[in-house]
């Protein structure tokens, strides 16, 4: 419990000035908290290192956090999961999106849990509080791309996979009705 709270505090501090892109501009920390909660509550995952990595999954990608900081505070196993799901922001967005599809089948089981929950959380955001400047076609394209990532994650956790499909189908329906 102590390490989980340390990770939540670390992530909250690192993401403290960030907001989500959606129309509500919710505090960014809500996203990693949701990802960790999905893994634990829906996926029934109890591995502390995976839950900690879920809390920290965007710190290297979206903050000034260095990999060594995560290794020092939370260990190399946590760092490994975080690095597996971290995009290289020096690459163009379209390349990063293609690489997520290509890399999904090769992720470790723990990283697949994180990636599934991350996509579920992001699909919910795109469905219910999309960025104001995103037309419905872009929202639908996001869900379709997330599905391609999902296809490479299959076979790892039936409850997470079922929730992904539920959110994907619901998202397409909601977006089409806009």
Image: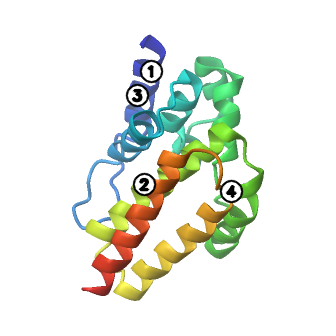
Q: Which residue is mark 2?
A: 163
- Residue depth check, mark 4 versus mark 2: number of the one nearer the observer: 2
Percent position of residue 94, x then y: 64, 75
- Residue depth check, mark 4 versus mark 1: number of the one nearer the observer: 1
Percent position of residue 35, x then y: 43, 43
Q: Which residue is mark 3?
A: 8
133 up-or-down from 79: above or below: below
Q: Earlier in the sequence, mark 4 or mark 2?
A: 4
Q: Give the CA separation, mark 2 to mark 3.
A: 24 Å
Q: Is residue 94 left or right of residue 146?
A: right
Q: Give the CA separation, mark 3 to mark 1.
A: 6 Å
Q: Which residue is mark 1?
A: 4
Do the numbered discs 4 and 2 sit on residues whose CB atoms are within 8 Å? no
Q: Which residue is mark 4?
A: 88
Q: Residue at x 35, y 40 (%)?
A: 16
Percent position of residue 86, x then y: 63, 49
Of the 4 image quadrants, the one containing the N terminus is top left
Of the 4 image quadrants, the one containing the C terminus is bottom left
Do the numbered discs 3 and 1 sit on residues whose CB atoms are within 8 Å? yes
Q: How many neighbours does mark 1 have within 10 angstroms: few (below 14), some (14-19), or many (20 or more)?
A: some
């Amino acid at each position: 419990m102590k390490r989980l709270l340390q990770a939540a505090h670390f992530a909250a501090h690192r993401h403290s000035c960030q907001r989500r892109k959606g129309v509500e501009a919710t505090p960014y920390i809500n996203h990693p908290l949701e990802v960790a909660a999905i893994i634990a509550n829906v996926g029934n995952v109890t591995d502390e290192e995976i839950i900690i990595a879920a809390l920290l999954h965007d710190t290297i990608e979206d903050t000034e956090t260095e990999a060594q900081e995560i290794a020092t505070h939370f260990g190399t196993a946590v760092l490994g999961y975080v690095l597996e799901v971290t995009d290289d922001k020096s690459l163009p967005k379209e390349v990063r999106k293609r690489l997520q599809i290509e890399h999904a089948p090769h992720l470790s089981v723990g990283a697949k849990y994180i990636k599934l929950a991350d996509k579920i959380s992001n699909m919910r955001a795109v469905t219910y509080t999309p960025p104001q400047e995103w037309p419905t076609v872009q929202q639908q394209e996001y869900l379709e791309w997330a599905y391609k990532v999902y296809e490479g994650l299959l076979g790892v956790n039936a409850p997470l996979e079922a929730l992904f499909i539920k959110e994907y189908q619901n998202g397409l329906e909601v977006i089409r009705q806009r």
